[in-house]
Amino acid sequence: MTPRTIDNEAVATIVGRFDSRPEMLVQILQQIVQHHGWISEDVIRQLASELNLSRADVHGVVEYYHDFRTEPPGEHIVKICQAEACQAMGSRELTEHANSVLDEDTTLEPVYCLGNCACAPAVMVNGKTLGRVSTERFDAALAAMREAGS
Amino acid sequence: MSAIRVYVPRETSSVSVGANEVAVAIAREAGNAGASIELVRNGSWGASWLEPLVEVEVGERRIAYGNVEADDVPGLFAAGFLEGGEHERRLGPIDEIPYLITQDRWTFWRIGLVESLSLDDFLLHQGFKALRKAWEIGADAVIDTVTEAGLRGRGGAGFPTGIKWRTVADAEGDQKYVACNADEGDSGTFSDRMLMEGDPFGLIESMAIAGFATGANKGYIYLRSEYPLTHTILTRAIDTAREAGWLGENIQGSGFDFDIELHLGAGSYVCGEETAMLESLEGKKGIVRYKPPLPAIEGLFGKPTVVNNVVTLASVPNIVNLGGERYAGMGVNRSKGSLAFQLAGNVKRGGLVEKSFGVTVRELIEEYGGGTASGRPVKAVQIGGPLGAYLPEEQLDTPLDYEAFMEIGAMIGHGGIVVFDDTANMAQQARFAMEFCAIESCGKCTPCRIGSTRGVEVIDKLISGEKRDESYDLLVELCDTMEDASLCAMGGMTPYPVRSVLKHFAKDFAPEAKA
């Protein structure tokens, strides 16, 4: 699993990848979240300093976008599409089922469209999109996720 | 003996139902059988309900097998899969599948056909032919051709592309940009994604043409983060194109410079609105800008910017190659050409159907879609994403034409068609429209930010039957305010689905709610 903490050096490396350009802030935050799961206050402070932005600026951007979690997620991240095409194929019922079977090690998040609307309902498990997810398929994916993660 | 080509899509939908596992199984079985195969990873033809759809090249034909699972592969090999053998999964030659061959594939013609990440395959299939022609005929002639074609923005707004390009070309500026909007957030839409995954070089060529025509040497693609596989494919395609001299300075010795930077979004629906997208590309919160100034005059970093949707851009190479008149000959009225419609939700045969404008909703969902997946009657069809109206059964004969849709208080948007069967509770769908707006509003204007939250509350009252006449009138008034006074389509069009439910499905609110 990806580590849920990030040190100054790792942040600096990511910033360096984008030549410390302040207009790359969304891209930098995206990489931090993808690799480390969340954005801490320390990261915000460091980014403000390295990109020559105010902390309020960085804070505003972090708060604005759904992808930028400010709390560490569980070991696994499961997203269930809550948009209309998936609703039409039972995503509300699937979400209820997920809530009843998920453990604390898994963060369940809503997502509004994975672009897999012809194979609804769609679910993303640790960054991987799945389609035609019945409750049986969901449980199988969960079992596979735990096996891969342990 | 040369290797037998076996096609297995590397495309989100196909992979989401097991295409990678099927590819692995095929390689293993071929190894066991001592057969020499070449695994080709193409895009999806768009028959999503048949995914994973694999093909094997037998002589000049490609024989398709549908809904293949990894467990089927040993049996397929036993049935002579590599010779196109008979099997319950066998569909026959790909070029005889009615769903595909009855379409008008103008923009999506290469998707499924070619290996997505092979520049050689792209070049073999008219790759960069239109860019070369653009250099030959000159920027003005390219814009004239696009204008003549009558191409309109496929992201949803339907603005004439030629006029936009002309505005940017004529704008004063030492630096101009092309910004490709790949923030395909509408539920029920996936055509941008399929295009980028199946024909990434086609998008690169299209952006280069837009840059050449308007005098821009830098392009941006703003891709939503919900498409990780697309990101991988586009990243590799851009690198490959650059290494081969199709991006960068002095492309192929033409004297034309053009390069592309790929940006990821971060889960904000509003960033699909063009000015919010520009803000996000600048590294800021995705908050909508006031217009004017238009992005064509003051866009990215204050410079003249062409902002076009993926499918809009990708429609251009064939317009340049075949002529604007030919494109304008397709479609109806002021809706020229074709649109890649996407059949989604509760539909038996979901997928991508590129058809000329003028086809009716019913033709698409019955003849292509085959009705609902559940087999129950169709209750409602939402077209154009979360801001689009819900059409009842009696409106399904409306032809897909921008103006015809406006007349019934609906919109075509990006061409997503989401089917609901008779178990759907439309009051819940109206509530969701407001709830989604409340979640995604950028917060800049009051009607959208506050109106959506109040909308959820009023709809809850309507559903419970509390003060029903008063609540009904209040909801209608709220819809008027949001529609008239919001800054962009988010707040301005959220009333569309709500009003359509009030008008056509009032019974789904409290039984006594007035219609």
Image: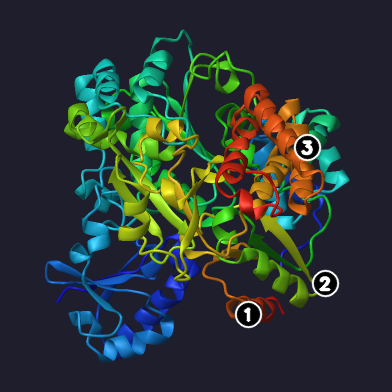
Count residues near mark 2 (Cα–Cα under 10 Å), then give few for <14, some for 14-19, many for 20+. few
Residue B190 vs B137, above or below: the answer is below
Residue at the image point whose x is 59% and y is 46% from the top: B501
Count residues near mark 3 (Cα–Cα under 10 Å), then give few for <14, some for 14-19, many for 20+. few
Q: Amino acid at mark 3?
A: Glu
Q: From the viewer's side, name the closer residue of B163 and B256.
A: B163
Badge 1 marks a residue whose secondary structure is helix
Q: Amino acid at mark 1?
A: Ala
Q: Which residue is mark 2?
A: A104
In the image: residue B194, left or right of residue B76: right
Badge 3 marks a residue whose secondary structure is helix
Q: CA distance from mark 2 to mark 1?
A: 17 Å
Residue A29: image tag: none
Q: The N terminus of chain B appears in which quarter of the rendering?
A: bottom left
Report the chain holding disc 3. Answer: B
Residue A144: image tag: 1
Q: From the viewer's side, name the closer residue of B451 and B241.
A: B451
Q: Position of residue B91 (x, y in %)?
A: 25, 74
CB under 8 Å between callouts 2 and 1?
Answer: no
Count residues near mark 1 (Cα–Cα under 10 Å), then give few for <14, some for 14-19, many for 20+. few
Q: The C terminus of chain B appears in which quarter of the rendering?
A: top right
Which picture quadrant has residue B51?
bottom left
Report the chain holding disc 1. Answer: A
Q: CA distance from mark 1 to mark 3?
A: 52 Å
Q: Which residue is mark 3?
A: B470
Residue B505 seen in render: yes
- Total marks placed: 3
Q: Position of residue B61 (x, y in %)?
A: 15, 68
